[in-house]
Every structure is written in structure tokens, then in C-alpha cells.
């Protein structure tokens, strides 16, 4: 297993670090084994598992990544994910995401496109160090934009040398394009007329497109807001009330109800530092087994 260097020291107050036009860096912490179904990121990402293990189901394919492994996640592809704490009760990972515009600017297309989750066991030390450097750069407010872009770009170049490249989530499918647009500002009070204009369609045509996908604009916006909330709960120390506001909810109780309806566990349950309750453990052991049995 490749030794993973410490990507910066954990500070008392964690945050998600974003550089516009480049990418996002986040540290994910979780202390309970919980299943998240149909997660779809608006940005392609590299995830380095530091502690515990990560299970990802991508269609018929099941990926099991342990400490020291890397998972490549494409944009706008729904995945079922389980983060599994180690024997000390900790799951910890670093996530580096790339802005679509940044991917397009680099135009690295060597190897095959990452269209589903990919798994790198014992990745090269150089790649791991490049990820460490990129994560640190995104967290450093004093670095010039071009320096941050250069350090994040080195990760893309490393992946290219290993035969992988990400594609920017540009799709002829207007529903996918709407998802990317809404994810850029989940808290915004999006109107159907505004969204339809963004994809050069009438409201009626857009509604038909959503109906064909068994969804609606409202359902998609809720899903995007809950996914954004999940990331904030895992990667920051912000109170639940603050997170609710940041994803468009004035009421913390309404937000919590929406979150539970989406993921089948509450925000406080996700952040709980206690061991897995028998009720939860039995439930998620059964669901993980169901994931495996589909193979």
C-alpha cells in the first residue's frame, strides 16, 4: 500500500476550499457506516482514502477502496456510496474536485475517459504528492490564482500519464446541463423560466424532458441541495442551522426532514461520533450485502 502523506494538519475549524475556475478541496470525516444512494457530483473528483474504506457501486460494478487507495469519480454519474469507518471508528478521505472549465482549458485527453468510478490501488507516490500539493494550494488564500491552477493541473497531468482523463460535464441532454447549472448555486431561488432559458428551451419542453427522465425541476433542486448539504456536513464544522441556510432552507427542521427523506438518516446521525447503533448497523449491513449481491 502506498504511504499517504499528511495533506495538511487538521485545523479546529474545517472548511471546503474553493478556487473559482480551478477546483475544490475538502476533507471528509465520518464515524458511522451509512449508505448514500444515487450521489451525482457536478464536478469530476479524485478521492484519496486515508482511514477506513469506501465502497462505490457504479451500475453493475462494485469498487472497494481501502486506506491508501484512490477513487476517480466522473461528473453527473449517479453512484451508490458507503463510507466505512476503521476499527477506531474513523472514515477519513480527501476529495479534490475540478471545475468543468478547468478541465476544458487543460484539454488533456490521453488514455480513456473516466465515465464510471475508477479505482487506483497503491497509486504512484508522485501522484499522491501532487494531490497533497494541490489540496494545500487550494487551502492557501495567499497563493496567486495561476500558481493554484498550476498545482491542481499537475494532478490532471499525472492521471493522463497513467491513462485516465476526465471530461467536462457538457452534455446534449438538457437535464444534465440543468443539474450542472443548479449545482453552481444550490441556495438560489431558481425559477422554471430562468432555467429553461439557460438551456435554450421553453418551459413546456423542459418539463417534458424531465418527465421522460421520471423527474422534475423541483425534485432535482432538492436532490442537489441535499447533496451539497451532505458535503458540508462531512467536510465542515458548521452548525446544521447554518448549513440549512447555505443550501436554501430558512427552517432547520424542514431541512432536516428533507435530508432524512433523501438519505434515510438525519444530519445529526451523520455527524454522530458514537459507534454504529445496532439498529443502524443491521440496516446498513443488509444494504451493503444487497449491493454485493447484485454483482
Image (cartoon, rainbow, N blue to C red):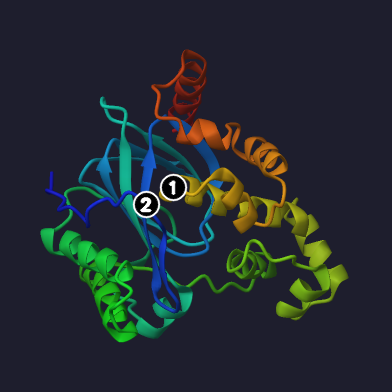
Residue 14 point in image, percent of width and height: 37, 53
User: Would you name the residue on which mark 1 appears?
Assistant: 237
**Rendered residue at 43%/50% (across/down):** 236
Q: Nearer the N terminus, badge 1 or badge 2?
A: 2
Above-or-below relation of 140 to 293: below
In the visual, does 9 lie left or right of 126? right
In the visual, does 115 lie left or right of 187? left
In the picture, which quadrant includes the N terminus?
top left
Q: Are marks 1 and 2 in contact (CB under 8 Å)?
A: yes
Above-or-below relation of 89 to 16: above
Front residue of 254/52: it is 254
Residue 97 point in image, percent of width and height: 40, 64
Q: Outermost residue, right direction?
A: 204
In the visual, does 93 lie left or right of 3? right
Is residue 255 visible in this depiction of the protein?
Answer: yes
Mark 1: secondary structure? loop
Cα distance in 3D space between marks 1 and 2: 6 Å
Above-or-below relation of 185 to 153: above
Mark 2: secondary structure? loop
In the visual, does 47 lie left or right of 240? left
Residue 205 got which mark?
none
**Rendered residue at 45%/72% (across/down):** 99
User: Would you name the residue on which mark 2 appears?
Assistant: 13
- In terms of image quadrants, where is residue 84? top left
**Rendered residue at 34%/77% (across/down):** 109
Is residue 216 visible in this depiction of the protein?
Answer: no
Front residue of 112/247: it is 247
Residue 143 point in image, percent of width and height: 28, 79
**Rendered residue at 83%/73% (across/down):** 193
Amino acid at each position: 500500500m502506498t504511504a499517504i502523506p499528511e495533506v495538511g494538519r487538521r485545523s479546529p475549524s474545517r472548511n471546503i476550499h474553493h478556487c473559482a475556475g480551478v477546483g475544490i478541496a475538502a476533507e471528509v470525516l465520518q464515524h458511522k457506516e451509512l449508505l448514500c444512494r444515487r450521489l451525482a457530483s457536478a464536478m469530476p473528483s479524485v478521492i484519496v482514502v486515508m482511514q477506513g474504506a469506501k465502497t462505490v457501486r457504479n451500475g453493475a460494478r462494485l469498487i472497494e477502496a481501502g486506506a491508501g487507495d484512490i477513487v476517480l469519480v466522473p461528473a453527473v454519474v449517479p453512484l451508490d456510496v458507503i463510507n466505512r469507518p476503521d476499527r477506531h471508528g474513523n472514515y477519513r478521505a480527501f476529495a479534490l474536485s475540478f471545475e468543468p472549465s478547468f478541465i476544458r482549458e487543460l484539454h488533456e485527453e490521453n488514455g480513456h475517459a473516466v465515465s464510471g468510478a475508477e479505482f487506483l490501488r497503491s497509486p504512484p507516490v508522485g501522484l499522491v504528492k501532487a494531490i497533497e500539493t494541490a489540496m494545500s494550494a487550494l487551502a492557501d488564500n495567499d497563493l496567486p490564482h495561476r500558481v493554484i491552477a498550476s498545482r491542481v493541473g499537475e494532478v490532471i497531468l499525472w492521471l493522463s500519464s497513467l491513462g485516465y482523463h476526465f471530461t467536462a460535464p457538457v452534455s446534449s441532454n438538457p437535464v444534465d446541463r440543468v443539474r450542472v447549472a443548479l449545482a453552481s448555486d444550490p441556495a438560489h431561488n431558481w425559477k422554471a423560466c430562468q432555467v429553461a432559458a439557460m438551456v435554450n428551451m421553453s418551459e413546456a419542453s423542459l418539463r417534458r424532458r424531465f418527465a421522460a427522465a421520471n423527474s422534475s425541476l423541483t425534485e432535482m433542486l432538492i436532490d442537489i441541495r441535499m447533496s451539497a448539504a451532505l458535503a458540508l456536513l462531512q467536510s465542515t464544522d458548521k452548525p446544521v442551522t447554518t448549513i440549512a441556510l447555505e443550501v436554501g432552507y430558512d427552517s432547520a427542521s424542514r431541512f432536516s426532514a428533507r435530508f432524512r427523506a433523501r438519505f434515510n438518516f438525519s444530519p445529526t446521525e451523520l455527524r454522530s461520533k458514537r459507534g454504529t447503533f445496532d439498529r443502524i448497523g443491521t440496516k446498513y449491513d443488509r444494504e451493503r450485502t444487497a449491493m454485493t449481491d447484485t454483482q
